[in-house]
Image (spheres, rainbow, N blue to C red):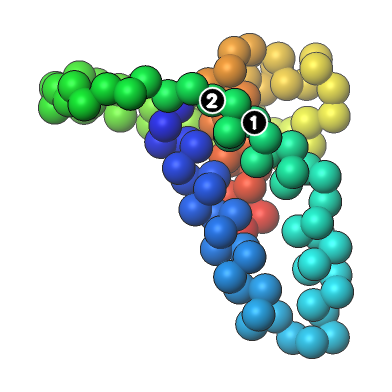
Amino acid sequence: MEYYCDQIREIMAEMLVTLEYVHVANRAYVEQFLDDPFFTWIDGLLRSVNLPDNDYYDPALNSVAKSIREIEEQRLLANLQAFKYVLESPETIKIVGHSGRVETVSSIYLNIKSIH
């Protein structure tokens, strides 16, 4: 979960930084896109995630978790591509990611990554 939260924050920060490099004629459109309530919602979601305050690190466990994350990400990515990244109903979300908070955050990450 921490991986996806960090990745989403990083992509959103990059989007804001690149705003200054957008051609003046297009800047209003990009600002409108970045001011969308979706980004406020994402920020609230990320702030609500309580990550453990834990310094425990096990390389073997981390490796297993990374492998599982990559497999799940491939599955979600294939499903998102099949729906052309349009998640318009709870039923669609269940089909794409089954259910669960981690899958929701990883789906958000893959969606944001696709527009980044």
Quarter occupied by the N terminus: top left
Above or below, 28 against 25 in this view is above
Quarter occupied by the C terminus: bottom right
Residue 89: horizontal and vertical position, in percent? 85, 22
Q: Amino acid at mark 1?
A: Leu
Pick the front one: 53 or 82:
53
For the residues marked 1 and 2, what is the alpha-carbon distance in whole angstroms? 7 Å
Instruction: Name the disc covering residue 45, or none.
Output: 1
- Quadrant of the rendered image containing residue 49: top right
Q: Residue at x 76, y 58 (%)?
A: 34
Q: Residues within 10 Å of mark 2 (few under 14, many from 20)?
A: few
Q: Secondary structure at mark 1?
A: helix
Q: Residue at x 63, y 12 (%)?
A: 99
Q: Amino acid at mark 2?
A: Val
Residue furthest to the left in view is: 59
Q: Residue at x 57, y 40 (%)?
A: 109
Disc 1 + disc 2, Cβ < 8 Å? yes
From the viewer's perspective, is 63 left or right of 1? Answer: left
- Quadrant of the rendered image containing residue 95: top right
Above or below, 86 against 13 in this view is above
Residue holding disc 2: 49
